[in-house]
Image: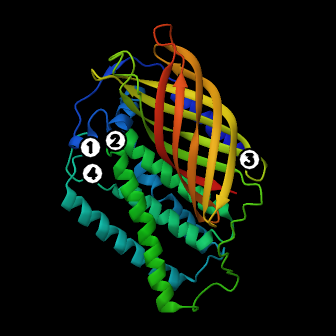
């Protein structure tokens, strides 16, 4: 299991370390929230700098993968939480709620897509569908093994990232779609549970309840999105970047409960005041410390040292800061973090200071 997480992180490094040239920001659609120095605009520029010609329909098909796997296991006789009839009713309620919310919001907000093809960008329907069926898999088979949930949500996350890579959605569209997909399924199953109560549950089903125990060692794998600004850019305008967005993978490997080794790899857009932009890629390792409180809350601090690659040169990467986690389930956390991070690239920019804030979705076991 640990090897799988490390392989994922290594693969991410190999994918993002590609040659690029400094790019002038493209014309963007989507209004003021998608300007070049916004989070959405920064993520789009990150994609444009790295893979400007990417085009693949994989997200059209991957969004349904958890549902196909769930039905396949059910057909093969592998018991899920509920019997066929109750499962189909739960899924029908969930799909109806999701479709109603997505389409109602899309044609009320009418946000332009990044590629300018239409005005129905927010929220992402692909992402909502992917996270809806992933939550169905979690509901039906997560009690048997958390790795069913991990696989389903990994497929959903890959679907969401595909919408950015294909230049079809802004990052905030994905967040809205994921929230709607998860919430719609939770509500759909809640309605069905009120209707059927204890009827038509599988005999082997046992409600796992909430069993998070901070006294145990937990491995963690996170996907994070962040936004950073550079305090010194006004003094050296068009030398030090103005702002940027980031995405990456973060892994915690415990030595003992609450502390251990952390590993990170990430990609960052760095956009100057004049609109010129390039990407920085980094890998870092360090230590983390966690202090749980209030049963579902956890404070974390980390200190990391690593190496960064940039068009203008390579250098040391140092990052440190706190994070606040909310435990949302037996194997899931949401983290909000803030970090100071500094890089050394060239003699003209011996130290580039930045402040990054962001959110991370974390699977732990």
Q: Is residue 66 left or right of residue 241?
A: right
Disc 4 packing (10 Å; few <14; some 14–19; many ≥20): many
Kindly identify which numbered label has been placed on residue 259. 3
Does residue 67 appear in this view?
no
Colour approach in the figure: rainbow
Query: Mark 3 or 1, which is nearer the eye?
Result: 3
Indicate which disc residue 294 carries: none
**Vertical side of 51 occupied by 259: above or below:** below
Looking at marks 2 and 4 on the same chain, the residue that comes earlier in the sequence is marked by 2
Q: Earlier in the sequence, mark 1 or mark 4?
A: 1
> Which secondary structure lies at badge 1?
helix
Q: Tags 2 and 4 in contact by the CB under 8 Å rule?
A: no
- Marks 3 and 2 close (CB-CB < 8 Å): no
Q: Distance between the residues labelled 4 and 3?
A: 41 Å
Q: Which residue is under mark 1?
A: 33
Q: How far apart are marks 2 and 4 (CA)?
A: 12 Å
Tell me if mark 1 has few (under 14), some (14-19) or many (20+) residues whose alpha carbon lies within 10 angstroms of its own: some
Q: Residue at x 36, y 30 (%)?
A: 48
Which residue lies under the disc numbered 2? 40
First in sequence: mark 3 or mark 1? 1
């Amino acid at each position: 299991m640990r090897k799988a997480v490390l392989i994922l992180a290594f693969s991410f490094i190999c994918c993002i370390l590609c040659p690029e040239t400094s790019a002038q920001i493209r014309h963007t659609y989507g209004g003021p929230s998608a300007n070049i120095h916004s989070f959405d605009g920064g993520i789009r520029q990150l994609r444009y700098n790295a893979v400007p010609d990417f085009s693949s329909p994989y997200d059209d098909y991957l969004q349904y993968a958890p549902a196909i796997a769930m039905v396949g296991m059910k057909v093969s006789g592998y018991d899920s939480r509920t019997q066929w009839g109750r499962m189909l009713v739960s899924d029908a309620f969930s799909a109806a709620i999701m479709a109603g919310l997505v389409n109602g919001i899309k044609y009320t907000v009418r946000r332009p897509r990044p590629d300018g093809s239409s005005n129905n960008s927010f929220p992402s329907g692909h992402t909502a569908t992917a996270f809806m069926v992933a939550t169905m898999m979690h509901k039906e088979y997560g009690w048997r093994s958390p790795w069913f949930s991990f696989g389903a949500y990994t497929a959903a996350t890959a679907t969401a990232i595909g919408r950015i890579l294909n230049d079809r959605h802004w990052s905030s569209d994905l967040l809205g779609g994921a929230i709607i997909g998860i919430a719609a399924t939770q509500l759909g199953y809640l309605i069905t549970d009120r209707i059927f109560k204890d009827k038509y549950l599988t005999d082997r089903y046992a409600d796992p309840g909430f069993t998070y125990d901070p006294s145990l060692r937990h491995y963690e794998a996170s996907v994070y999105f962040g936004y950073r600004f550079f305090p010194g850019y006004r003094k050296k305008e068009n030398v030090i970047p103005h702002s940027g967005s980031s995405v990456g993978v973060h892994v915690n490997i415990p030595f003992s409960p609450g502390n251990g080794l952390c590993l990170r790899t990430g990609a960052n857009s760095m956009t100057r005041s004049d609109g010129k932009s390039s990407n920085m890629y980094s890998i870092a390792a360090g230590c983390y410390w966690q202090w749980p409180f209030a049963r579902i809350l956890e404070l974390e601090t980390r200190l990391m040292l690593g190496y960064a690659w940039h068009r203008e040169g390579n250098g040391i990467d140092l990052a440190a800061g706190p994070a606040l986690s909310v435990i949302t389930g037996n194997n899931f956390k949401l983290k909000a973090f803030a970090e100071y991070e500094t890089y050394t690239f060239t003699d003209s920019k011996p130290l580039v200071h930045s402040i990054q804030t962001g959110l991370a979705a974390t699977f732990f076991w």
